[in-house]
């Protein structure tokens, strides 16, 4: 029952943050359309899903830290999943900045496709960012120690 309440409260908190985020996004979009500034709503559109992804993983992350597990970082998962999703998130707003980077960006034909892909990539990146912190596997350390002995 305690675990159920823990997850229920987290669900309500995340739902409230999503609701407040939509209000903030509407305010940013309205202000940007009045001032003819494109960058703030696009940056919010790209970074807010990252926050949602972090919040989705945060309850389990906190439980793992409470158990005082040893901390490691899964670089393979971060490089295989995290970096491509970060690339998609950054490419939603970097072309609108004054930075002159020689990083290839993608162009989508539909604004809705861009926002959907950016939102999914942001949630994935935020989730993977916390998911990469893990307990080191005992089997891996045994294999390494056996290789050192040989």
Image: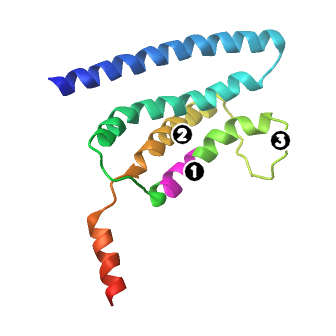
Query: Could one spot residue 108 in this view of the protein?
Result: no
User: Sequence order check: which comes first, mark 3 or mark 1?
Assistant: 1
Q: Nearer the viewer, mark 3 or mark 1?
A: 3
Q: Nearer the viewer, mark 3 or mark 2?
A: 3
- Counting from the top left corner in percent of width and height, residue 103 is at 75, 52
In this rendering, is residue 102 above or below 58? below
Q: Residues within 10 Å of mark 3 (few under 14, many from 20)?
A: few
The quadrant of the picture occupied by the C terminus is bottom left
Q: Is residue 57 left or right of residue 38?
A: left
Q: Which residue is mark 1?
A: 84
The quadrant of the picture occupied by the N terminus is top left
In this rendering, is residue 93 above or below 79? above
Q: Which residue is mark 3?
A: 99
Q: Is residue 105 left or right of residue 88?
A: right
The magenta stretch is 78-85
In contact (CB < 8 Å): disc 1 and disc 2: yes
In this rendering, is residue 82 above or below 21? below
**Where residue 45 is drawn, which disc sits there?**
none
């Amino acid at each position: 029952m305690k675990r159920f309440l823990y997850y229920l409260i987290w669900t309500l908190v995340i739902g409230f943050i999503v609701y407040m985020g939509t209000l903030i996004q509407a305010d940013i979009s309205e202000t940007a359309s009045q001032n003819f500034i494109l960058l703030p709503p696009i940056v919010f559109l790209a970074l807010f899903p990252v926050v949602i992804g972090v919040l989705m993983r945060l309850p389990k992350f906190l439980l793992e830290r409470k158990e005082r597990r040893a901390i490691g970082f899964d670089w393979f998962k971060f490089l295989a999943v995290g970096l491509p999703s970060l690339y998609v998130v950054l490419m939603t707003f970097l072309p609108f900045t004054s930075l002159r980077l020689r990083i290839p960006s993608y162009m989508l034909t539909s604004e809705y496709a861009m926002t959907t892909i950016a939102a999914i990539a942001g949630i994935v990146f935020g989730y993977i960012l916390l998911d990469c912190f893990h307990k080191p596997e005992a089997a891996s350390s045994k294999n390494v120690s056996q290789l050192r002995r040989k």
